[in-house]
Image (cartoon, rainbow, N blue to C red):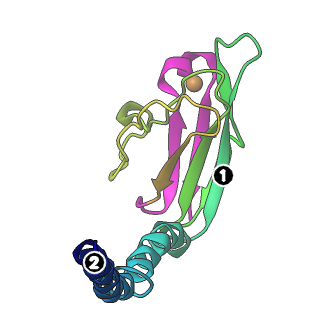
Amino acid sequence: MRIMNKLSLLGFAAMLAACGGGDKPAENADTTGGGAAAPAVEAPVAEAPAAPAAAPAAQGNVITVQMVTSPDGASGHFEPANVTVKKGDTVRFVNDGKAAHNVSFPPAENAGKSNLPPASPYVTAAGATYELVVNMDAGTYNFQCDPHATMGMKGVLTVQ
Ligand SMILES: [Cu+2]
């Protein structure tokens, strides 16, 4: 019995020792993995979206043009259709989500003009945007929504 008790006490002491020994590594682990390092990693990640948001601001003024679908959904118009910008400005085309629209500057409609931007992808979702950074020289440029151009979805971009 006494031996059993002694063994039990030894076992208990061993457990205490194990626990005591375990605390220190646990504290070390908390110090290492906890506070300092992890938030430091998260902070740059949280700041990352700020950089793209700041980028458009650096590219001149942002002029918003709505892509408005006609009530029957068969056509649409740009609002405003006549836009005046400076080189380096950004034109942000915003779709109303009721039809797919795009923005193109067909060479045939812009004779003699150079540096025309490529036709944009189709913008479909409500609030979806296509942002055009104006890199053309001063002049007047005709743009359109390709599927709706014959129905009047056209605009004029004047670069000062
Ligand atoms: Cu359209």
Bounds of the magenta segment = 135-160
- Residue at 66%, 52% (x, y): give it: 64
127 left or right of 4 in image = right
- Residue at 55%, 66% (x, y): give it: 86
Residue 24, percent from left and from top: 32, 89
Image quarter hosting the N terminus: bottom left
Q: Is residue 1 magenta?
A: no
Query: How far apart in space, not on screen, are marks 1 and 2 (Cα)?
Result: 89 Å
Residue 94 in which image quadrant: top right
Question: Mark 1 falls on what kind of element?
Answer: strand
Residue underneath mark 2:
2
Question: Mark 2 falls on what kind of element?
Answer: helix
Q: Nearer the viewer, residue 145 or 49?
A: 49
Instruction: Tell me, for residue 51, which label it has, or none.
Output: none
Image quarter hosting the C terminus: bottom right
Residue underneath mark 1:
64
- When the figure is inspected, residue 25 is found, relative to residue 154, above or below; the finding is below
Quadrant observed for ligand 1 in the rendered image: top right
Q: Nearer the viewer, residue 33 or 87?
A: 33
Tell me which label, 1 or 2, sits earlier in the chain: 2
- Residue at 35%, 41% (x, y): give it: 118
**Residue 87 showing in the rendered view:** no
**Disc 1 residue crowd, few under 14, some 14–19, many 20+, Cα 10 Å:** some
**Disc 2 residue crowd, few under 14, some 14–19, many 20+, Cα 10 Å:** few
- Residue at 37%, 87% (x, y): give it: 27
Q: Nearer the viewer, mark 1 or mark 2?
A: 2
